[in-house]
């Protein structure tokens, strides 16, 4: 009997007092029990299977199950029987060992009967390891009837010599102990097991259970890394073997509820990696070793984990990137898809893999109707939320401005014109994609509102085409730009078109005084580039760059406008200098003013005072580094650039947001500028 449980009245004590014909399937069950008790080996095997078949799964057991428990327990107590372990497992399944939450009806009666049996805990020390393992499993059934189980199981774990039994003891300890006040103690105990057990399977099981709990206790990171790699290497990350008898609901239920298998160890990989903190070398080493293993699950988990590392920490990622490129040809579609997601999400770091991505992409043809599930294949198109869109491989190469994809982008303008972001990627190439202007003009001329069911879709599609055409061939876009209403977007396109847009000068001048800062600033930029009117542009910039009511964004735009005017705005140098020294000015405005002083007056002094802004506002470091590189202030910049290179955390890293590929590229460019500033030649 388990001491510490609430005293209860056992409903049945012996099976011989049961009138079996009165129970549902009672006579059949009685025959099975007789075969188990005195039949030959074949009869016993058949009876055990049939008892499992007769019991339901994930619902209340039948009265015959409660009635059969005392006799089954008596059979387990017979040390001469060779099948005591399977019989005790059956007892646990009938009593709801995999359903600790079920505490009503016949299942509750079964659990109370089992809790009152004196020999249950004694079987934890039985000579037969199968019996000990079955006892460690079955004891879960009485978890909610006693409070002594966690301590009992922990004590037994220390003395248990068999690793398989220790694994079951560990699972049962978590189920019985990780509740209430025992939650924290269970986490500490699991961390100790993960650090100290001699068996690999026990250690990886402890780690898996530990990281499944909220805020896991600290563990030894190097030991955990070796455990994880060993578990992948030995193939421990596997689903339990399929049941030989699919018609056994109770066994199927136990298999579904078993905590012996986790579909991959991604949480363990994340926890082990995070345990190294900001020490990037062992984290990269862990992932490199995983992708080198001849195990598809290890490769997939490493590739899925790599982006979160790369987005946060700087490091030597070239070998990992090249290995991901190789895995684009892996036999497993999950691995291919994970490799492609990694390369697509890390920006400039993926450039060394561009040739491998192009090699895989160039062998495919665009599909008119891409499938949502591409089976890990590298393709030109995929299916997104809004419809077809460029596939990750095509997006990656386009974002790296790889000109090898331009002919296919030209083709997609006809074959998949509705592909999301197609126009934006073409526009990113600028004049290098001028060869696509003919197709863009033709698509614009052929565009009709009646071809679209949604007017907003038509406007968005036309705006995308016009933006791409203006970016790659501004002169060819002017006929279409002349039809556009004056707004912020159109003003930006007119500025890009330059002197070819002189016909829109009256509209641009009218926008200089509309009262909306964003429109006025865009108009000032356009009037300078289209009409060459420095005074008109400077007048607008003057209104906004040091006006206390202006937002930092408007002030920066105005100051940058003065900087683009160059020496023509030299008379504003004194006001810009005062702005860099004024207290309480937004750091982005201070940096913009220092940049403008260099461009309009050749003044380096303001740039040499940006160290405090560099340290207080990491977001502006790329712009400051570019300014220092242009002014040649390497001596002043050296200590800041050196400190940045010695910092492993990305300047724009966030604990709460995924870092887009563009921001990873921005940080990599910052590092390149810092290397230039600390180079001996500087």
Image: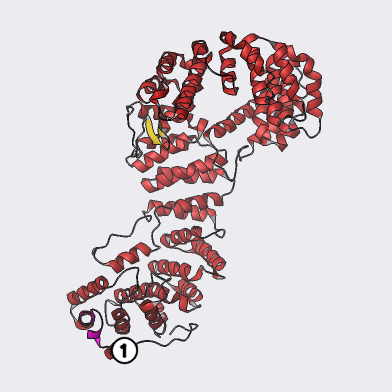
As displayed, is residue 358 above or below residue 3? above
Q: Quadrant of residue 612?
A: top right
Q: Residues within 10 Å of mark 1 (few under 14, many from 20)?
A: few
- Magenta: main secondary structure equals helix
Residue depicted at x 78% and y 22%: 576
Q: Which residues are magenta?
A: 18-31
Q: Is residue 27 left or right of residue 239?
A: left
**Picture coordinates of residue 519, whole percent (x, y):** 64, 23
Please say whether residue 437 is visible from this viewpoint: yes
Residue 29 lies in the magenta-colored region: yes
**Picture coordinates of residue 438, whole percent (x, y):** 42, 13
> In which quadrant will I find the N terminus?
bottom left
As displayed, is residue 466 above or below residue 145? above
- Circle 1 residue: 14
**Picture coordinates of residue 668, whole percent (x, y):** 57, 31
Secondary structure beneath disc 1?
loop
Please say whether residue 401 is visible from this viewpoint: no
Q: Is residue 534 left or right of residue 101?
A: right
Residue depicted at x 77% and y 32%: 585
**Picture coordinates of residue 5, whole percent (x, y):** 48, 82
Residue furthest front as drawn: 450
As displayed, is residue 277 above or below residue 555? below
Number of numbered tags placed on the structure image: 1
């Amino acid at each position: 009997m388990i001491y510490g449980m609430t005293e209860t009245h056992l409903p049945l004590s012996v099976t011989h007092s049961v009138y079996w014909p009165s129970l549902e399937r009672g006579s059949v069950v009685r025959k099975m029990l007789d075969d188990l008790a005195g039949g030959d080996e074949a009869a016993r095997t058949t009876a055990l299977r049939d008892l499992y078949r007769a019991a339901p799964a994930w619902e209340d057991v039948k009265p015959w199950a409660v009635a059969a428990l005392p006799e089954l327990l008596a059979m387990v107590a017979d040390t001469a029987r060779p099948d005591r372990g399977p019989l005790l497992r059956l007892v646990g399944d009938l009593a709801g060992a995999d359903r600790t939450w079920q505490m009503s009806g016949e299942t509750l009666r079964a659990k109370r009967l089992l809790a009152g049996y004196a020999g249950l805990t004694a079987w934890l020390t039985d000579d037969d390891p199968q019996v000990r393992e079955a006892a460690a499993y079955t004891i879960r059934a009485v978890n909610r009837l006693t409070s002594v189980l966690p301590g009992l199981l922990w004590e037994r774990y220390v003395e248990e010599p068999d690793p398989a039994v220790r694994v079951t003891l560990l699972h049962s300890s978590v189920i019985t102990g990780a509740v209430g006040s025992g939650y924290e103690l269970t986490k500490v105990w699991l961390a100790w097991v993960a650090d100290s057990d001699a068996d690999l399977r026990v250690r990886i099981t402890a780690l898996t259970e530990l990281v499944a709990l909220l805020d896991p206790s600290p563990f030894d990171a190097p030991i955990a890394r070796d455990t994880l790699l060993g578990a992948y290497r030995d193939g421990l990350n596997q689903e339990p073997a399929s049941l030989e008898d699919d018609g056994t609901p109770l066994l199927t239920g136990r298999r579904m509820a078993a905590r012996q298998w986790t579909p991959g160890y991604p949480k363990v990989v994340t926890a082990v990696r995070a345990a190294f903190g900001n020490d990037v070398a062992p984290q990269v080493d862990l992932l490199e070793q995983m992708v080198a293993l001849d195990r598809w699950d290890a490769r997939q988990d490493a590739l899925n984990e790599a982006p979160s590392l790369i987005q946060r920490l700087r490091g030597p990622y070239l070998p990992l990137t090249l290995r991901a490129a190789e895995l684009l040809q892996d036999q497993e579609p999950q691995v291919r898809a994970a490799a492609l997601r990694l390369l697509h999400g890390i920006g400039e770091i993926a450039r060394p893999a561009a040739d491998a991505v192009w090699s895989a992409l160039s062998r495919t043809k665009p599909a008119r109707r891409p499938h949502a599930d591409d089976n890990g294949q590298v393709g030109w198109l995929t299916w997104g939320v809004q419809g077809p869109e460029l596939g990750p491989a095509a997006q990656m190469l386009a974002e790296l401005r790889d000109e090898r994809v331009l002919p296919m982008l030209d083709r997609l303008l006809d074959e998949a014109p509705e592909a999301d972001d197609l126009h934006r990627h073409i526009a990113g190439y600028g004049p290098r994609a001028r060869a696509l202007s003919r197709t863009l003009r033709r698509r614009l001329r052929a565009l009709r509102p009646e071809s679209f069911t949604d007017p907003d879709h038509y406007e968005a599609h036309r705006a995308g085409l016009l933006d791409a055409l203006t970016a790659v061939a501004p002169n060819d876009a002017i006929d279409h730009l002349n039809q556009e209403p004056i707004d912020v977007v159109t003003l930006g396109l007119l500025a890009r078109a330059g002197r070819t847009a002189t016909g829109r000068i009256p509209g641009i001048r009218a926008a200089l005084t509309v009262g909306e800062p964003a429109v006025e600033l865009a108009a000032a930029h356009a009037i300078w580039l289209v009409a060459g009117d420095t005074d008109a542009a400077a007048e607008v910039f003057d209104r906004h760059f040091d006006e206390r009511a202006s937002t930092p964004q408007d002030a920066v735009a105005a100051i940058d406008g003065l900087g683009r005017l160059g020496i023509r705005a030299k008379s504003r140098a004194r006001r810009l200098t005062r702005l860099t020294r004024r207290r309480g000015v937004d750091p982005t405005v201070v940096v913009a003013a220092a940049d403008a002083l260099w461009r309009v007056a050749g003044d380096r002094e303001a740039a040499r005072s940006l160290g405090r802004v560099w340290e207080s506002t990491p977001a502006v470091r790329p712009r400051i580094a570019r300014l220092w590189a242009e002014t040649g202030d390497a001596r002043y910049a050296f200590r800041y650039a050196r400190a940045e290179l010695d910092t492993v955390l990305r300047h724009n890293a966030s604990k709460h947001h995924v870092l887009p590929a563009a921001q990873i590229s921005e940080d990599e460019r910052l590092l390149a500028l810092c290397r230039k500033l600390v180079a001996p030649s500087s």
